[in-house]
Image (cartoon, rainbow, N blue to C red):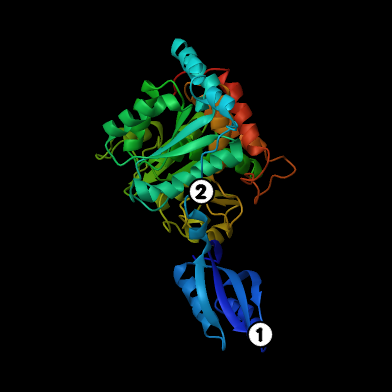
C-alpha cells in the first residue's frame, strides 16, 4: 500500500538563499516535485544578500525526507544549514513533567505541605488507609506499566525504547481525562518479577494500566494482579481495543441493518487483543465467530492449543471449520483483523456476504488495503489516522480510568466494558452515522465524559473483582 506524506515524518530545513533571483520561489516546487508537502515556510532572517528560511514539510519516511533535502540542496544558490526532525524535537527531554499543585512561597506553606504539618496527614492515613484516596495523589494517579516486549508494532524492543510510548500514553491520560499517569518501564520479562514489582508499588496509584506486554504472559500478569490488588487493573491492548471494536461494530451493523446475534464474524488474530475482542463480542451477543491465527482456524481438533486457544476453540467455530483465513472469510458478514499486514486481498473481501464490514486494524499496514477493501465493503475501519473510521484506544482508556477513579473502583467488570462500548457508540448520533463515520474522533469533546459516566454508573460507587465471559 502506497503511503502518503505524514507529520510523523515532518522535517524543518533551515537554509539560506540569495535575496534576489528565483531561489525562494523554487523551494516549494522542489519539495512538491520530490513528493513532499510544504506545511510552513518562514523567513527567519533577512539581509540584502541572503535570506534565512525555515522550510517545514511532511515526508513518507526517513529516506523520503532525505530525498526532499537533496532536492532543496540542488537548487542553485541554496545552502543547507540544519535539518531537524520535528518528531524527535518534540521528544527532547521527555514529554511529561511533575508540577506542584500547591504554592510553596513561604515557611508557613512549607510547614503544611511538608514537615511538620504533613505528619498529621500521614498519621491519619496510617489509622485509615482508605484516606489515601482522599488526601493524596492516589485518587487521580495511574501507573502505565510495560516490560517493553510488545511495543506498538515494533516488537520486543525493551524498557528504555518503550519509555517514549509510555510517556505519550501518560500525556493522553492528562489531555483527555485530567488523570496524572506515570510510565513504569520494567527491566524484566519474568511474570513473577513483573507481578511482584507492580504489587509493591501499587499503594501509590489508584489504577494500573498494563501496556505493550506480549502474549501469553500478559494474560497471567493481568489475572494475578487482579487477584492481588484492590485497585483496577486494565490491559489496554486487550480491553481498550475490545471496547473500541465493539463500539465501532455496533454502529457499523446499524449502517448495514444487521444484528450482532445474526452475523458471521471472522477474526484474524488470537493474541492479547484478539482474545479480548472476542470475549467482549460474545458478551455482546455474537454467536457465529471463527478465529484464525497464523496456522488457520482455531478449532477443537487442533493439537497445538494452549489454554487461551483452547478457550477460543470451546466458545467459537461450532461447525469445526479447519481451513485457512481466506476460506473463513468467504460468506462472512464481518471481518475483524488484529494480526498482521497484507494477509487478505480485495478479492477476499469480495467473497464476503453482501454489505460486509471490514475492520483491518493492524498498524501501520492493515490486513488488507483499505482502498481495495472499500471497493467491496459497505464499511471499512482501520487503526490509521489517514482513513475514515480510525479505531484508536485513546477513545476508551482515558474515560474508562476516569470513571474507575471517580467511583473508587477496586476492579474492572465485563459489565463496565460493555457500558463503555455502548457509551462510545452512542456519541455518534443517528444523524451523523454513516459508512465513513461509525466511531467519533479522538478529539470529540463528549468521548471521555460519556465513557467515564457509563463506567462510573456501572461501577455503582465501588466495584470488586473481574468477571470473565
Instruction: Name the one closer to the observer, 63 or 90.
Output: 90
Q: Residue at x 64, y 74 (%)?
A: 45
Task: Choose the circle earlier in sequence order: 1 or 2.
Answer: 1
> In the figure, is residue 19 to the left or right of 390?
right
Residue 467 lies in quadrant:
top left
Residue lying farthest to the top in this orientation: 127
> In the figure, is residue 166 to the left or right of 58?
left
Q: Residue 182: image x %, image y %?
A: 46, 38
> In the figure, is residue 22 to the left or right of 77?
right
Residue 399 lies in quadrant:
top right
- The answer to whether one can see residue 369 in this image is no
Instruction: Name the one closer to the observer, 97 or 320.
Output: 97
Residue 238 is marked as: none
Mark 2, secondary structure of its residue:
loop
Residue lying farthest to the front in this orientation: 107
Q: Residue at x 25, y 40 (%)?
A: 304
Crowding around mark 2 (Cα neighbors within 10 Å: few <14, some 14 to 19, many 20+) is few
- The answer to whether one can see residue 312 in this image is yes
Of badges 1 and 2, the one in the foreground is 1
Instruction: Name the one closer to the observer, 232 or 437.
Output: 232
Q: Which residue is mark 2?
A: 95
Q: Residue at x 53, y 37 (%)?
A: 397
Crowding around mark 1 (Cα neighbors within 10 Å: few <14, some 14 to 19, many 20+) is some
Q: Residue 351: image x %, image y %?
A: 50, 54
Q: Which residue is mark 1?
A: 19
Labels 1 and 2 touching (C-beta < 8 A): no
Q: CA distance from mark 1 to mark 2?
A: 38 Å
Mark 1, secondary structure of its residue:
loop
Quadrant containing the C terminus is top left
Q: Residue 76: image x %, image y %?
A: 56, 89
Amino acid at each position: 500500500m502506497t503511503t502518503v506524506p505524514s507529520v510523523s515524518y515532518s522535517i524543518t530545513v533551515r537554509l539560506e538563499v540569495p535575496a534576489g533571483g528565483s531561489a525562494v520561489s523554487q523551494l516549494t516546487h522542489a519539495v512538491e516535485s520530490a513528493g513532499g508537502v510544504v506545511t510552513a515556510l518562514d523567513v527567519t532572517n533577512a539581509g540584502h544578500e541572503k535570506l534565512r528560511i525555515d522550510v517545514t514539510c511532511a515526508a513518507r519516511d526517513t529516506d523520503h525526507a532525505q530525498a526532499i533535502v537533496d532536492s532543496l540542496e540542488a537548487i542553485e544558490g541554496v545552502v543547507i544549514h540544519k535539518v531537524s526532525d520535528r518528531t524527535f524535537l518534540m521528544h527532547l527531554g521527555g514529554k511529561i513533567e511533575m508540577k506542584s499543585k500547591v504554592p510553596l512561597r513561604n515557611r508557613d506553606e512549607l510547614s503544611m505541605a511538608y514537615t511538620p504539618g504533613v505528619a498529621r496527614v500521614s498519621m491519619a492515613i496510617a489509622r485509615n488507609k482508605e484516606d489515601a484516596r482522599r488526601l493524596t495523589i492516589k485518587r487521580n494517579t495511574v501507573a502505565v506499566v510495560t516490560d517493553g516486549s510488545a511495543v506498538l508494532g515494533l516488537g520486543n524492543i525493551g524498557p528504555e525504547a518503550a519509555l517514549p510510548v509510555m510517556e505519550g500514553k501518560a500525556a493522553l491520560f492528562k489531555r483527555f481525562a485530567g488523570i496524572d499517569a506515570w510510565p513504569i518501564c520494567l527491566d524484566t520479562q519474568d511474570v513473577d518479577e513483573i507481578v511482584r514489582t507492580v504489587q509493591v508499588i501499587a499503594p501509590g496509584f489508584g489504577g494500573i494500566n498494563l501496556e505493550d506486554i506480549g502474549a501469553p504472559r500478559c494474560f497471567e500478569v493481568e489475572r494475578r494482579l487482579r487477584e492481588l490488588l484492590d485497585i483496577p487493573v486494565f490491559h489496554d491492548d486487550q480491553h481498550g481495543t475490545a471496547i473500541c471494536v465493539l463500539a465501532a461494530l455496533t454502529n457499523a451493523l446499524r449502517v448495514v441493518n444487521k444484528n450482532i446475534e445474526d452475523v458471521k464474524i471472522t477474526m484474524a488474530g488470537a493474541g492479547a487483543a484478539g482474545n479480548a475482542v472476542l470475549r467482549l463480542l460474545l458478551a455482546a451477543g455474537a454467536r457465529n465467530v471463527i478465529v484464525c491465527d497464523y496456522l488457520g482456524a482455531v478449532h477443537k481438533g487442533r493439537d497445538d492449543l494452549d489454554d487461551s486457544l483452547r478457550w477460543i476453540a470451546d466458545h467459537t467455530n461450532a461447525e469445526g471449520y479447519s481451513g485457512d483465513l481466506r476460506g473463513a472469510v468467504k460468506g462472512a458478514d464481518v471481518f475483524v483483523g488484529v494480526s498482521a499486514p497484507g494477509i487478505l486481498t480485495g478479492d477476499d473481501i469480495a467473497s464476503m456476504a453482501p454489505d460486509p464490514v471490514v475492520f483491518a486494524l493492524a498498524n501501520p499496514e492493515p490486513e488488507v488495503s483499505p482502498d481495495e477493501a472499500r471497493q467491496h465493503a459497505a464499511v471499512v475501519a482501520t487503526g490509521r489516522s489517514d482513513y475514515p473510521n480510525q479505531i484508536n484506544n485513546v477513545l476508551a482508556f482515558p474515560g474508562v480510568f476516569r470513571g474507575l477513579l471517580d467511583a473508587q473502583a477496586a476492579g474492572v467488570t465485563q459489565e463496565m466494558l460493555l457500558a463503555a462500548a455502548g457509551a462510545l457508540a452512542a456519541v455518534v448520533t443517528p444523524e451523523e452515522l454513516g459508512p465513513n463515520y461509525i466511531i467519533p474522533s479522538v478529539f470529540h469533546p463528549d468521548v471521555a465524559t460519556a465513557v467515564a459516566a457509563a463506567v462510573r454508573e456501572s461501577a455503582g460507587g465501588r466495584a470488586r473483582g473481574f468477571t470473565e465471559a
